[in-house]
Amino acid sequence: MVRPTAPRPGAPRRPGPSPAQKSPAQRQREIATLLMRLDAMLKQTGEMGLAARERISVGGLTRYRRFSRRVRDFFALAAVAQERLDAAPGEMEDLIGPMTTALERLHTRMVILFVEGSAGFFAGFARVKALPIGTHEMCGVELRGVVEIRKFLDDPLYDGERGQALRVEADRIVKLIRVVMDRIPPLPDFGDEPSIGPKGALNSPLKGPGAGLPRPARPGGRPQAIPPEPPRPPPEVRSLSLDQFEDDEDD
């Protein structure tokens, strides 16, 4: 799910590679456009979170994954906006502060939206009687995303009662997801090599009917040579004469 690709907005500015030559006005419009897109994504994400909670037992997990994917896209775009602010020229010094504050607020609102939306969804999803196939693996992916968001909440920005409440809520979401994962077994692994499960455990492949047979060639490797079929002898052709036909008639 959500895997932040850059530090939280508001982190100390660091020098970045010089972008293409643009005027301060062009860079200002570029950053402003990114902030407006982030604001629009924030509203869309809220609607997607509500849609995921409308019918949790029927396709709810699929809709929640769309919601979490939108959150991931938001943080990726927020990282781009932060890079633009870090590379802003000195002529924009008066605007860097307000724009950084706006980006920081959008970032915080998305964290709150994600935590509250995830808490509402998994509180209901944990009570669903019939879970779809693959729930264990899909919830494992979302679990890692929640853990990453939980790291945001350790930032001093989230000190205070509201931040403490969000931390408690994020920890509750982690427990709810694990409860769901414990209810349904993971899909069987018929591969040849051990695999890493959603919780990080090393899973051994199942030994099916083909155990002990030579392994097929791996993708990208040289295919196994098939021995050519031995050539078949040509059919025997005999020449016939009129005398042979006459002998047959006499018989």
Image: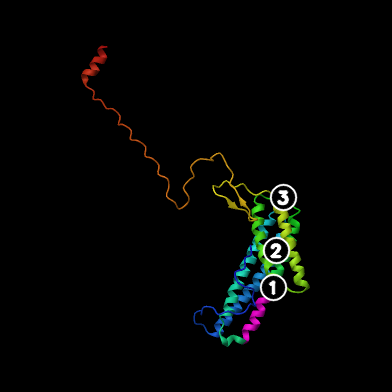
Please state which of the two labelled residues, at mark 1 or mark 2, is closer to the viewer: 1
The answer, for residue 57, to whether it is visible in the render is: no
The answer, for residue 114, to whether it is visible in the render is: yes
- The residue lying furthest to the top in this view is 251
Q: Earlier in the sequence, mark 1 or mark 3?
A: 1
Q: Earlier in the sequence, mark 1 or mark 2?
A: 2
Q: Amino acid at mark 3?
A: Arg
Kindly report the distance in space between the C-alpha atoms of the residues bearing marks 1 and 3: 33 Å
Place of residue 175 in the rendered image (x, y in percent of width and height, measured from the top left): 73, 58
In the depicted structure, whether residue 65 falls above or below residue 223: below
Density class for disc 1 (Cα within 10 Å; few <14, some 14-19, many ≥20) is few
Q: Secondary structure at mark 3?
A: helix
The residue beneath circle 3 is: 183
In the depicted structure, whether residue 90 falls above or below residue 208: below
Density class for disc 3 (Cα within 10 Å; few <14, some 14-19, many ≥20) is few
In the depicted structure, whether residue 196 falls above or below residue 226: below
The residue beneath circle 1 is: 155
Q: Secondary structure at mark 1?
A: loop
Q: Amino acid at mark 1?
A: Asp
The residue beneath circle 2 is: 49
Q: Amino acid at mark 2?
A: Gly
Q: Using residue 190 as the reference point, say whether residue 154 is left or right of it.
A: right
> What residue range appears in magenta?
94-107
Q: Using residue 96 as the reference point, say whether residue 244 is left or right of it.
A: left
Q: Secondary structure at mark 2?
A: helix
